[in-house]
Image (spheres, helix red, strand yellow):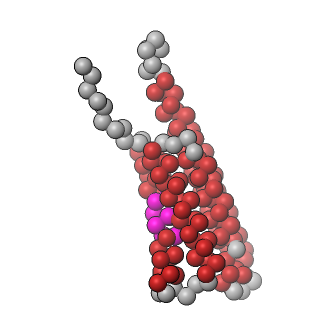
């Protein structure tokens, strides 16, 4: 009789990436909550951006943790949407023109983070599935 196996924990790298995405999502949702309860005077459109970014970040965190096939997609989506939010802050917050260059660089860095995270997640998931399929009876 075979005993049921315990749920596998994700590899350390995926755990770390999941925690990073979870913290980013939590930060975005914190901004939304502060805007809703009135302790933040940022424009409503920024709260909308933060809600979208928080939702995508939470999905990327969950997908990274469970090893979902769609996790890299949400990592890229996080980079694109959060990067676009950062790049669009100048007109939203009425910042001086000198801030535009820094915001574009910041947005690009967020995009790069999302793309690199997706690349690493995809690589990690492919390696993990290859290890699992090599243990199928007849392939040992």
Residue drawn at (65%, 63%), measured in percent from left and top? Answer: 81
Compared across the picture, whether 16 is left or right of 2 comes to right
Residue drawn at (66%, 60%), measured in percent from left and top? Answer: 80
Q: Position of residue 32 (x, y in %)?
A: 52, 75
Our reading of the magenta stretch's main secondary structure is: helix
Compared across the picture, whether 133 is left or right of 108 comes to left
Figure check: 101 above or below 17? below
| Residue 85 visible in the picture | yes
Q: Is residue 35 magenta?
A: no
Query: On the rendered image, what quadrant is the C terminus found in?
Result: top left
Residue drawn at (63%, 53%), measured in percent from left and top? Answer: 76
| Residue 116 visible in the picture | no
Figure check: 39 above or below 115? below
Q: Position of residue 98 (x, y in %)?
A: 73, 82
Q: Position of residue 47 (x, y in %)?
A: 58, 76
Q: Is residue 23 magenta?
A: yes
Figure quadrant of residue 69: top right
Q: Which residues are magenta?
A: 21-28
Residue drawn at (43%, 21%), measured in percent from left and top? Answer: 135
Query: On the rendered image, what quadrant is the N terminus found in?
Result: top left
Figure quadrant of residue 97: bottom right
Figure check: 134 above or below 34? above
């Amino acid at each position: 009789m075979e005993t049921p196996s315990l749920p596998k924990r994700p590899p350390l790298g995926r755990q770390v990436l999941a925690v990073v995405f979870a913290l980013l999502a939590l930060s975005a949702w914190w901004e939304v909550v502060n805007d809703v309860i009135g302790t933040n005077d940022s424009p409503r459109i920024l709260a909308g951006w933060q809600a979208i970014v928080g939702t995508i970040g939470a999905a990327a965190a969950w997908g990274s943790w469970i090893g979902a096939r769609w996790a890299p997609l949400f990592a890229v989506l996080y980079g694109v949407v959060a990067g676009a939010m950062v790049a669009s802050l100048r007109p939203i917050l009425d910042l001086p023109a000198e801030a535009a260059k820094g915001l574009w660089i910041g947005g690009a860095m967020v995009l790069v983070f999302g793309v690199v995270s997706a690349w690493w997640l995809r690589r990690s998931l492919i390696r993990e599935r290859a290890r699992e399929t090599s243990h199928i009876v007849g392939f040992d």
